[in-house]
Amino acid sequence: MELTGMRLLVLEDEYLIGLELERIAEECGTKSVHLVTTIDELLFWIGSGAECDIAILEVQAHGKSSLQAASYLLQRGTPVIFSTAYDQQRDGVDGFPDTPVVVKPYGKCQIVKAVTSVLGSRQADEPSCKLV
């Protein structure tokens, strides 16, 4: 599938949604998923020198912005996808015109399409979309 063999970093402050996203990623063949729930955990992970192939970052986690971390990941060549509960960010996040956004509730289809867009791989055409 679209994530086969990839290492995924996920920032999601709602733990159950994070677990569901982890399940979706594993279903799509990821090699590993590292789930963090706070900006501090995210920054620690980045600072540790750990690497990932793609990151899905909630725009705001517990009231703190992930944009600085997203900038750093993008600068080092890691594709980023933003997730948000705010519909007004559906068309993008200020300062990140080329970074796709998935709006909650999202399902496998939305994640696969976002991954496809940042990786430039084959078209995502998943028939069933279960909401997270």
Image (cartoon, grey):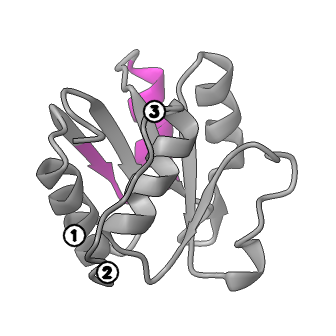
Residue 31 belongs to magenta span: no
Q: Is residue 30 left or right of residue 35?
A: left
Indicate the position of residue 60 as horizontal and vertical percent values.
61, 66
Amino acid type of the residue that numbered disc 3 sits on in the rendered structure: Ser
Q: Residues within 10 Å of mark 1 (few under 14, many from 20)?
A: some
Residue depicted at 23% across the width and 51% down the height: 25
Q: Which mark is residue 20?
A: 1
> Residue 115's image quarter?
top left
Residue depicted at 31% across the width and 80% down the height: 132
Amino acid type of the residue that numbered disc 1 sits on in the rendered structure: Glu
Distance of label 1 from label 3 (alpha carbons): 23 Å
Q: Earlier in the sequence, mark 2 or mark 3?
A: 3
Indicate the position of residue 11 as horizontal and vertical percent values.
42, 54
Q: Which residue is mark 2?
A: 132
Q: Are marks 2 and 1 in contact (CB under 8 Å)?
A: yes
Indicate the position of residue 10 as horizontal and vertical percent values.
37, 50
Amino acid type of the residue that numbered disc 2 sits on in the rendered structure: Val
Q: Secondary structure at mark 1?
A: helix
Which residues are drawn in magenta?
34-48
